Structure formats: C-alpha cells, structure tokens
Amino acid sequence: MAVSAPPSREPRTFASPAEVLSSLAGIAYRAAPLAATYLGGRLDPELRERVMVAVSRVNACRGCTFVHERWALRTGVTTADLEAIGLGELGPLDQRSRAAVVYATARAEAGFREAAPADVAAATAEHLTARELAAVEAVARAMTLANLSVSTAGALAARLRRGD
C-alpha cells in the first residue's frame, strides 16, 4: 500500500505568540461548522481526510501527513488520490474533492490572512455548498493549528537540546 512521499520542505511553525492567538481565534469563530463536520457529518469522511492530508502537506507536517494518509485510506480514499494530492496534480480527484482541496490548500498557504483568490472561490462555489465550504475552512484551520503546534513544539525542543 504505497502512498505519496512525505513533504520535503521544512515544517511551518508559528512565528509568534500573536500568531498562535490569531489561529485560536479563527478556530473559535468557526466552532459551529467544525462541530457540524465531526458531530453532524457535514463533510463525508473521505472529503474531510483529503482536505486534512492536503493541508498537512502544505504545512510540511510529516507526522500529521503520515497519520491522515492512513486514516484517509481507511475511509475509502484511494492510493491514487493520495498520490495526486501529494504531487499537486489533482486531475484524478472528483470535482467536489478537487475544489475542496484547492480551496483548503490556498487558504493554508496564505496562512488564512487573506481571502481565497477569486478564481479559487468561484470554482469552489460551483462544487460545494456554503455550509460545506464553511466546514472545509474550519477543517483546514484546525489542521493548520495542529500542524503548526506540533512543528513549533518540535522546533522549540530541538533548540533546547542544542542549547540555543
């Protein structure tokens, strides 16, 4: 069962305590769609895991990528889909999944500081309802918070070991 290689770039970390607080505020503001996703099934598990794998790759969180690729396979995501996400060649994904992954990736890459590009927002609106889009946004933000928290903790621990 081969899946795509882990991210090769350096993991993203929080730049400051203010960035952590901003990230937490973004999650708190989206608590209802996040709860609806996990408790109410607003997104099907396959779509949710595709988004989580894509975001963990953007953030270069190797551990999260590894775990979510395995979870994705358990929900029914194919190895081919995971490889496509890993390569950024999303043609094999269905249009709904492609729209969600492109949107979540664009938002995570921008650090949620700016709106999604107009073409990405328009393409997403064609394939996802407003409620689904809110759920994708919430999942992407939660995944980014988790990724950056893990990577920041790892970076701090490495600095302490080196005596920086």
Image (tube, rainbow, N blue to C red):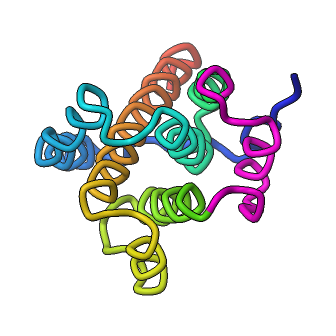
- Residue 123 versus residue 146: which sits nearer the camera? 123
Q: Nearer the viewer, residue 87 or 43?
A: 43
Image x and y of residue 115, in percent: 32, 74
- Image spot of residue 106 (x, y percent): 49, 66
Q: Residue at x 65, y 43 (%)?
A: 10
Expressed as whole percent of the image width and height from the top left, the position of residue 103 reads 46, 64
Find residue 43 and report its image quarter: top left
> In the image as oriented, which residue stretches furthest toward the right?
2
Above-or-below relation of 99 to 158: below
Within the magenta stretch, is there residue 92? yes
User: Which residue extends farthest top?
Assistant: 161
Residues shaded magenta: 73-94
Q: Is residue 2 magenta?
A: no
Q: Residue at x 46, y 57 (%)?
A: 104
Displayed quadrant of residue 89:
bottom right
Residue 156 in the image, given as x and y percentages of width and height: 45, 25
In this view, 94 is above or below 9: below
Residue 13, placed above or below residue 96 = above
